Amino acid sequence: MTTTLVAFSALSAVAVLTAPQNLITNGSFEEVRDGQPAGWTARDQAPGSGVCDQACEGVRALRIVGANPDKIPLYLQSNLPAKPGGTYLVQARAKTAKAGTNFRCYVEWWLQEGKYGGAAQTKWRRGTGKWQLVSYSFQLPQNAKPPYIVLQLKGEGEIVWDDVAMLALQVLPPPPADQRPALLLNGHCQDDADANGIPDYWSPTNIRACRWQDGTLLLESADSDVISAWRQAGIPTQPGRRYRLTYRARGDEGARFRCHLSWARLRDERGDHGGIAQQEGSVWLKADGAWVDHRLEFTSPYKPTAGMTLSLELQGAGKAAADDLALAELGPGSLTLGPSPPRASALDTSRRGVHLRKDGIALIDGTPFFPLGLYHFENNDHEFALLNQAGFNLLGCHLDPEKAQDLLDRLQRFGLKAFGHSSIVVAPPADNAAVREKWQTLVRDTLAVVGRHPAFVAWYSRDEPAWGGQPLERLKEAYDAITQADPDHLIWVLHAPRNTIETLQTYNQAGDVTGADIYPVPEGGGHSELENKTITSAGEYTDRMVATGRPVWMVPQGFAWAHLGDKPNPISPTYVQSRFMAYQMIIHGARGLVWWGTRYGRKDPQLWADLQKLAGELAELSAALVGEDGPRRTHVGLGELSPQPVEYLVKRAGGEVYLLAANASPEPATLHWNAREAGVQAAALHVLFENRTVPLTDGQLDDDFTPYAVHVYSTAPKPPERLVPVTKATRQELGR
């Protein structure tokens, strides 16, 4: 191991990177046509936008003015002469008129086959009222069309842009995997094969701040609000493997630096595997002027990625240097890939609290419970009374120790239960002792209040953790800490309609119950990743969740997509569609339903009325829904499928037989069912909620279904008693 001692005051001896040609036309905005910068196109800008004399350097700059809080004014330049496969550095200066104004500068591209390709640096930044440097690098995919660059202001405000540049970096491409000499290439920072002043396989994010001397990466910046970095992308890591990064670093006393690790999302022949929220080495280190050896051990994400990016970063003004970087694989992580057995205490039905029957039905103090829940609600007693009356029984609540007691007490009065949102469901990074101590205290304080309350059912883990690439080992650490302190409640892991079943199984190690959200209305949209873009995808996704090996609480659609952005002509699920999706999820094995989006869906009074009606029907049927499963037939999804479009599930409860049947077709269909296979000897069956009966001829039921219709047949003339009745508090609140 060799160390090059560098005197920070002698930077004249260091290789200074020479900036290549700017691919942005008129990035300094000095060329003007009719008050607007030549080569740029404006959209949604307010009066006053255009070239101005408030330049950071030179004479002119670009001002963007926004007068409408609902619009995003922008200037863009398209057809940039960037070569596919190339690596590029984007830099710009920006100054907002007021602190707090949001802005961004990003590059976006489409693929040659006409599909959306991606974008670099779309995150909004917050202005400070002073000049700020925007600086980042990216690689353009091999099959990308010429990209475009966008300068944006969010809503109302004013921003000035100057010195916008996109520069081609001659970054040496990595060798093929079978010829790669090490995971981290040129970690000793000695090689510069093309003598361009950039060490092989490394790229700078800030031409002004990044320097290099043989064997040492240097960072020197005078900008107090900029992160400058040397980066190496595409470092191969395997899912769920343990690695060790070692390096030497020094900096001016007080300089803040870190070696930060992140992962790129993978899109391959199996589809889009989703983003990667997991990051390592996030804690900023403070230099003391001396060379120090550093070591960072971590587990790579437990899902496929497009490779890791290592960034040697300097925060703000100062100087730092690093060399002798090395990455080694240590072995498997602490968790397994694929399925895992459920927690034993979650299945211990002899205890009080919330547990799981062998068939996945939830038990509260030994009494079966079928969740009919909502993510969104208004926090007042009248709302609670209306929801209890309608048939809902579970609400998503933010539960902090100071406010949880009052909220849970009120829910209990109205026969409602809670699943809880809280930051305790993910443990902080291991290298941040102060934050971890606060988290441990919060876990204790929260469970002391929430864990004892009869209205509490389950914690809600990080939303869609597999799709978002959340740090699984930290989720599992939190899961273990919570369930060891409170073994008598559940943790629910809700997934996006994405990822492979194996990836979902892997992430289910951080929960007791799983599920997915699926919002397929209007049909043909992109929320379903399956070929099936119809409402019958509700059943297919339920099958995928059941295949992961955990009990399933599914999340149906409670809104119109247009509601999310206040767009015109919203298309909400009809009552027939909502009813079909709910019953199909149950037929395919869901043990609970929790609707998302009613905060927006209430903009459509008919949709909200339909969901209340549906919740009431399912609440009346709840004692049957927690009954014993009988024969099942499905037309879509996994496993053995029937060519007949009418799907069904037989349930047995209280000595009666219930047949839930749904037509999984946009065409009319007829159900032919042999009731004797379920032990039914009656001459006719009652059709619940329809005030009719259907005769059985030689034990066979024949009944017609309109498209996506649902019929519920029973040997009993009416549904059983609701599991969760209308409470006295509800009757008093509603004046009944």
Image: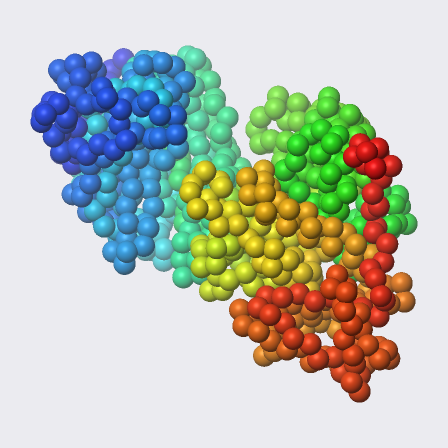
Indicate how the structure is coloured in the image. rainbow
Of the pair 71 and 668, the residue shown nearer to us: 668
Of the pair 277 and 528, the residue shown nearer to us: 528
Of the pair 484 and 697, the residue shown nearer to us: 697
The x, y position of residue 82, in whole percent, is 19, 43
The x, y position of residue 168, in whole percent, is 20, 38
The x, y position of residue 419, in whole percent, is 71, 39
Which residue is painted at 76% across and 83% down in the image? 700
Horizontally, is 174 left or right of 617 in the view? left
Of the pair 638 and 584, the residue shown nearer to us: 584
Which residue is painted at 53% across and 50% down in the image? 572
Q: In which quarter of the image is residue 589?
A: bottom right
Which residue is painted at 74% across and 79% down in the image? 701
With respect to residue 83, does 25 lie above or below?
Answer: above
Q: In what quadrant of the picture does the C terminus appear?
A: top right
Horizontally, is 712 left or right of 577 in the view? right
Say whether residue 316 is visible: no
